[in-house]
Amino acid sequence: MVTVAMLVIALGSPAAAGADAASYAGVTPGSETSDNLPPKAEEIPEGALMLTWPGFMMRKEGGSRFFVQTSRPVEVATKKSENRFELVLRNTRVHLSNNYRPLETEFFDTPVRRATVQRRGKKDLVMVFELRAEATPSVTQEKGKDGFNYVFVDFAP
């Protein structure tokens, strides 16, 4: 299970977490290199569409951002219901089973209590956002400088 301390380190607040910034070896959207990312872009089989990392960060301007790193652009769909928002990733597989672990965010100033990646049928993945407050995020997708694709789910402050 991901702990709050792990999320704080991932969010780049080493003073609060008691660690130095160099200790975080995870994904940082906007990075120009994939050297510290599991996996490296060249390790993905050609043509495979894989979710390689789910992540969370608080935004400096307020609000919160969840993201999934994928090996290439992905077709997405969304579904909203009471206390739940779903991001469907069509024809996508998970690279590592560790990516199914929940992102526990209930101690952060975000309407999301927890987000988890789940298998949906034989071909799709869904990132399920368990909401503690009514919210409708914006969803965008862009190619990163590191060679990976990113789908962003942004919640307002």
Image (cartoon, rainbow, N blue to C red):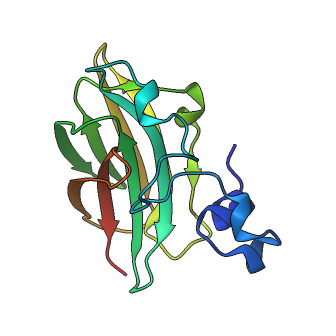
Return the residue found at the far right. 18
Image coordinates of residue 89 in percent, x first then y, are: 26, 35
Residue drawn 74% across the image and 59% down it: 23
Residue 44 left/right relative to 21: left
Image coordinates of residue 155 in percent, x first then y, are: 33, 69
Return the residue found at the far top. 122
Between residues 72 and 82, which one lies in front from this camera angle? 72
Up-down relation of residue 22 to residue 38 (above or below): below
Image coordinates of residue 71 in percent, x first then y, are: 34, 34
Between residues 6 and 110, which one lies in front from this camera angle? 6
Between residues 132 and 150, which one lies in front from this camera angle? 150
Q: How many marks?
A: 0
Image quarter in which the N terminus is found:
top right
Residue drawn 54% across the image and 27% down it: 96
Image coordinates of residue 134 in percent, x first then y, are: 32, 67
Up-down relation of residue 58 to residue 36 (above or below): below
Residue 92 left/right relative to 116: left
Image quarter in which the C terminus is found:
bottom left
Residue drawn 64% across the image and 52% down it: 25
Between residues 14 and 138, which one lies in front from this camera angle? 14
Residue 87 left/right relative to 114: left
